[in-house]
Image (tube, rainbow, N blue to C red):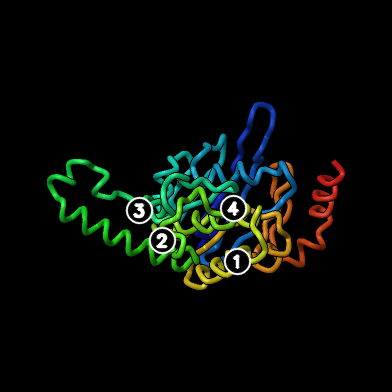
Amino acid sequence: MTGSLLEVANVARRFGELRAVDGVSLSVPPGKIVGLIGPNGAGKSTLFNLIAGSLKPDQGEIRFEGKRIDGQSPDRIFRAGLARTFQIPRPFPQMTVLENVMLAPIDQRGERFWNNWIRPGSVQAQERRARERAMEVLGFTGLAAKSADLAGQLSGGQQKLLELARILMIEPRLILLDEPAAGVNPALLDTLIEKIIALNQRGMTFLIIEHNMDMVMNLCRPIVVLAQGKVIFEGEADGVRADPRVLDAYLGDVAA
């Protein structure tokens, strides 16, 4: 796994007797869009939570840019340049779209109340730069016209674009996307895919959980398949379609 941006090595997590993640190892090379798929209950979301710091593994190691991050807090991992979105977006609904995005930058001087008295010019200058950057990001995601709207008024697809805009404020090196296509209409999904491709072409790396197989097969290289907490396949799209273990895992899930 040398040269990987993210390395997951023999990671496990139990919930009582359930082994939600059971000795998972995978790598995410820099500059790739990696797909993470599997039937319901395969352990995908648990693995994301372990990588992003919401959960601590019972065993194994997780390294980002060669440094161990397993067990670190989510904010520390975020500061390191690894950001995630959620299957169900979590905006601040009573704040505007612009305000939601402007909250994302780290260590804003205005967060320390005394700076507003001691260094008001510095606080205002930083806030001005954050606003300019936020409008730039909203323009990229197609939400600039919605900047003054309340975030809670956006459609589900627009809220997913808003989540993407928020994490782009820190210019992360790796983005974990949790089911970006879920609940998104086809037109907005095309926009979201277009933005993922554009960001990837700029050098940004993605690890994506997704149930939309057309999206995964066309967008992701390589693809990792989880079933019952274990990696059962890692490779190209043609291999996913032909692998009997993958077919059995999905057919078994449908039958259940």
Q: Amino acid at mark 4?
A: Gly
Please state which of residues 186 and 31 is positioned toward the viewer in this rendering.
186
Q: Earlier in the sequence, mark 3 or mark 2?
A: 3
Q: Secondary structure at mark 3?
A: loop
Q: Residue at x 65, y 26 (%)?
A: 16
Q: Which residue is mark 1?
A: 193
Q: Amino acid at mark 1?
A: Ile
Q: Amino acid at mark 3?
A: Pro
Q: Amino acid at mark 2?
A: Glu
Q: Position of residue 58 (x, y in %)?
A: 56, 34
Q: Secondary structure at mark 1?
A: helix
Q: CA distance from mark 4 to mark 3?
A: 24 Å
Q: Which residue is mark 4?
A: 156
Q: Secondary structure at mark 4?
A: helix
Q: Earlier in the sequence, mark 4 or mark 3?
A: 3
Count neighbours of disc 2 (C-alpha within 10 A) and say few if under 14, some if 14 to 19, many if 20 or more: some
**Which labelled disc corresponds to residue 165?**
none
Q: Horizontal placement of 228 versus 194: left or right? A: right
**Which labelled disc corresponds to residue 105?**
3
Q: CA distance from mark 4 to mark 1?
A: 15 Å
Q: Quadrant of residue 240?
A: bottom right
Q: CA distance from mark 2 to mark 4?
A: 23 Å
Q: Which residue is mark 2?
A: 171
Q: CA distance from mark 1 to mark 2?
A: 18 Å
Q: Quadrant of residue 207?
A: bottom right
Q: Quadrant of residue 148?
A: bottom left
Q: CA distance from mark 1 to mark 3?
A: 24 Å
Q: Horizontal placement of 103 versus 182: left or right? A: left
